[in-house]
């Protein structure tokens, strides 16, 4: 953050010129995370006229005129020969806050509650108390600045609001002060209540409500744009008359038909939703970012810290921690589809309630009938103890309310922990509450780290067709001891058959045949699959291209057939075991592998495959060995802090005869990710803390290199109000 309001200071080392002088820098900024060239192309270029210093020296550039308190992503590229260089990465900073702005010239001073019926800017100059609604706005194009003062409303009986507008066809801004509900006892007395206002911004408020069915900020039916930012909302309501509708939310935005942005807010209490965002149609960006929801306690069933029911929402860099469910993305029509939920930190618990007094469950992230939803790079921790609920850290339902199949859902690069600390409730990492009813399921579950005390994968309720889970790390939590009942996967689909469940190239020390079946399970099947890679050479060590590779299992069924490429490489997938009702594992190995090419030779042998396997074949000598040599570790490894919660890791490739299949990423010695790229953004970190990061190469034979490590300190906190 810069020293003055609305400023940021960028510091970096000027790059080597490579013989072409650096004549300037291109600086871009974005609210969204910048992680690719495509992201950068949509970012805004900031004008500046900095003259580059000599290569290898410290550059300092101060940017001004930015929105105070906003967290922005900045990327810098040198301009050489008139052309900007390549995008590397972007770092985040909160823009400097500094002293608040002075009142606008010509603003009208307010000294008491009342009705605002004329366009203009109004500034409150003192604390006020109202028996009913404090300010009712009936004019368009109004800015109400509370001037840092406090409104206490609703001290008398009946319905009242702090600020209320209905049917205003224009822009309305409410900002800069505190709104507190009085003790009059009226029902649904919201702190801010705006209905059918064209263009809304609510900013920098501190709102406290305590009465029955009271929202902190309630905004409904916005045709154009709505933004709620830098607010602190304490929704201490303890009575929710109907949790289905309308329910209670600390911040509610319903029927938002245009762009929406909810950012840098802190919610410190809510009995149901922390933030609820709903709207069928969308034009413009829909962004939910850099919010903190801390300390909520759901008093009714299905209370979520974030409820996202608006098309195309981008939900990122939020910190959620409370006795509530985490994030709910759902669709009952065109709302809730094509959402992205990424780089959020969630720590969730829940408890039984009047509707479910004996048993309840908490979701970290729940995807329900929402096609096109991408869930990636989140850190989710769910904890069950005797006072709280069962954990289903990620819950996936792939049918909508019309029982239509949902496609295009992805769950990638998340770090998920489901931890039980008592015997009453279980903790499951991935809950499959509903698959698809059709013949296909395109759900992508890849490169996640799943840790669980009870079940890593739980398939229950509607069952339906499963999907391929590929390249995930599966871990067992031993918080209740090694004697505690644990299974990799459980089938309890009492509703519909559950076929097509596949695990491929799992990274784990667990026995993948640790499977259990709940009574009454409908027909189901599951497979355990591994990649077999071959490197085929002749007597001189030269690659043998176009050799025919045939693999059959012990039952004589063809696993795959292919040909080697120009480098003599080939690969395919084998089914190590099949499982079905009755828990009868059907082992398919060993596998007969045959490699042949006319004029070179033939090799054939039975090979046990119980994990990633790589064979190095000398076709001339008709011999082969299983690759058991570890790959070399990366030579270079960099850790670059990007924000208060993210660090970018980059490394060199290393080498291996059979090829690198993936890299395993560690944070302070614990597995944090798996990737097939030479970079990885570690999310979910604590601001201002120093971490040790490490990476290990994993080759096609399942061998791991020695780790290479580096340290980095995350940046300052950039979520929450910050002004």
Image (spheres, rainbow, N blue to C red):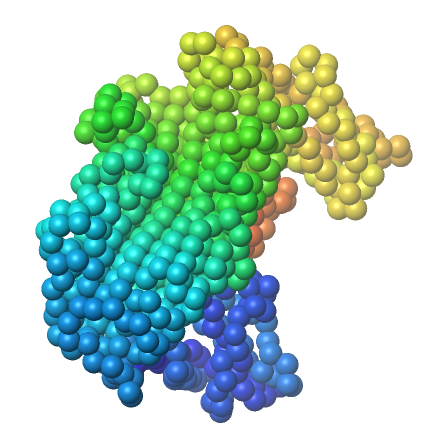
> Vertical placement of 29 versus 520: above or below?
below
Locate residue 144, reporting x and y percent: 28, 72
Residue closest to the eye, 160 or 613: 160
Q: Quadrant of residue 439?
A: top right
Kindly identify the residue that appears in the image at 55 percent across and 30 percent down.
Answer: 402
Locate residue 623, reporting x and y percent: 72, 29
Residue closest to the eye, 257 or 445: 257
Kindly identify the residue that appears in the image at 59 percent across and 65 percent down.
Answer: 37
Lateral position of residue 566 relative to residue 201, left or right: right
In the picture, which quadrant includes the N terminus?
A: bottom left
Lateral position of residue 231 relative to residue 516, left or right: left
Kindly identify the residue that appears in the image at 40 percent across and 50 percent down.
Answer: 254
Locate residue 415, reporting x and y percent: 40, 43
> Vertical placement of 704 versus 14: above or below?
above
> Vertical placement of 574 versus 264: above or below?
above
> Vertical placement of 412 versus 689: above or below?
above
């Amino acid at each position: 953050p810069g020293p003055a309001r609305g400023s940021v200071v960028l510091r970096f080392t000027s790059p080597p010129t490579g013989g072409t002088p650096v004549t300037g820098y291109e600086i871009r900024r974005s609210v969204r995370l910048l992680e690719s060239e495509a992201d950068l192309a949509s970012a805004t270029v900031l004008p500046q006229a900095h003259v580059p210093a000599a290569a290898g020296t410290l550059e300092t550039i101060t940017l001004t005129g930015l929105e105070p308190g906003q967290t922005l992503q900045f990327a810098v590229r040198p301009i050489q020969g008139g052309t900007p260089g390549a995008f590397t990465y972007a770092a985040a900073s909160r823009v400097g806050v500094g002293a608040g702005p002075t009142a606008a010239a010509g603003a009208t001073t307010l000294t008491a509650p009342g009705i605002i019926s004329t366009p203009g800017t109004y500034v409150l100059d003192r604390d006020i108390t109202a028996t009913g609604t404090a300010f009712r706005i009936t004019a368009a194009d109004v800015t109400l600045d509370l001037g840092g003062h406090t409104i206490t409303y609703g001290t008398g009986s009946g319905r009242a609001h702090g600020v209320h507008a209905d049917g205003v066809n224009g822009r309305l801004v409410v900002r800069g002060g505190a709104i507190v509900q009085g003790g009059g006892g009226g029902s649904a007395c919201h702190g801010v209540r705006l209905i059918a206002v064209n263009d809304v911004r609510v900013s920098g408020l501190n709102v406290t409500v305590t009465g029955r069915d009271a929202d902190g900020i309630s905004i409904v039916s916005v045709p154009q744009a709505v933004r709620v930012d830098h607010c602190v909302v304490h929704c201490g309501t303890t009575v929710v008359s109907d949790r289905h509708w309308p329910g209670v939310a600390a911040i509610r935005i319903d029927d938002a038909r245009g762009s929406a942005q909810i950012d840098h807010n802190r919610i410190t209490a809510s009995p149901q939703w922390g933030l609820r965002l709903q709207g069928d149609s969308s034009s413009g960006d829909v962004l939910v970012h850099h919010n903190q929801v801390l300390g909520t306690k759901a008093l009714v069933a299905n209370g979520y810290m974030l409820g996202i029911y608006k098309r195309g929402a981008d939900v990122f860099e939020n910190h959620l921690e409370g006795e509530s469910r985490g994030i709910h993305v759902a669709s009952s029509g065109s709302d809730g589809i094509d959402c992205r939920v990424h780089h959020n930190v969630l720590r969730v618990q829940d408890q039984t309630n009047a509707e479910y007094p004996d048993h309840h469950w908490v979701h970290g992230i729940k995807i329900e009938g929402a096609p096109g939803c991408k869930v990636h790079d989140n850190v989710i921790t769910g904890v069950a103890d005797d006072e709280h609920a069962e954990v289903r850290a990620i819950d996936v339902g792939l049918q909508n309310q019309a029982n239509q199949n949902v496609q295009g859902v992805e769950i990638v690069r998340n770090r998920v922990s489901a931890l039980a600390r008592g015997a009453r409730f279980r903790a499951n990492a991935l809950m499959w509450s509903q698959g698809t009813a059709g013949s296909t399921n395109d759900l992508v579950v890849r490169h996640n780290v799943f840790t669980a005390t009870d079940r890593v994968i739980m398939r229950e309720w509607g069952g339906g067709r499963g999907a391929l889970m590929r390249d995930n790390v599966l871990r067992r939590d031993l918080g209740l001891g090694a004697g505690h009942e644990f299974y990799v996967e459980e089938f309890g689909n009492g509703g519909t058959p559950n076929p097509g469940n596949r695990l491929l190239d799992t990274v784990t020390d667990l026995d993948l045949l640790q499977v259990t079946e709940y009574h009454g399970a409908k027909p189901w099947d599951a497979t355990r699959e591994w990649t077999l890679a071959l490197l085929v050479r002749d007597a001189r060590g030269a690659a043998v291209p176009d050799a025919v590779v045939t693999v059959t299992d012990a039952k004589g069924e063809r696993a795959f057939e292919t040909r080697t490429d120009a480098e003599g490489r080939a690969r395919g997938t084998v089914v190590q075991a099949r499982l079905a009702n009755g828990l009868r594992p059907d082992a398919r190995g060993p596998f007969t592998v045959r490699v042949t090419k006319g004029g070179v030779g033939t090799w054939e042998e039975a090979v046990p495959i119980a994990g990633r396997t790589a064979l190095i074949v000398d076709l001339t000598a008709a011999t082969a060995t299983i690759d058991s040599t570890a790959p070399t570790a990366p030579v270079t490894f960099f850790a670059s802090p990007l924000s208060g919660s993210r660090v970018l890791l980059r490394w060199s490739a290393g080498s291996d005869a059979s090829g690198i299949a993936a890299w395993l990423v560690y944070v302070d010695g614990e597995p944090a990710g798996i990737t097939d790229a030479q970079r990885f953004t570690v999310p979910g970190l604590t601001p201002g803390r120093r971490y040790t990061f490490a990476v290990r190469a994993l080759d096609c034979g399942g061998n791991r290199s020695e780790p290479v490590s580096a340290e980095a300190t995350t940046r300052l906190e950039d979520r929450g109000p910050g002004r």
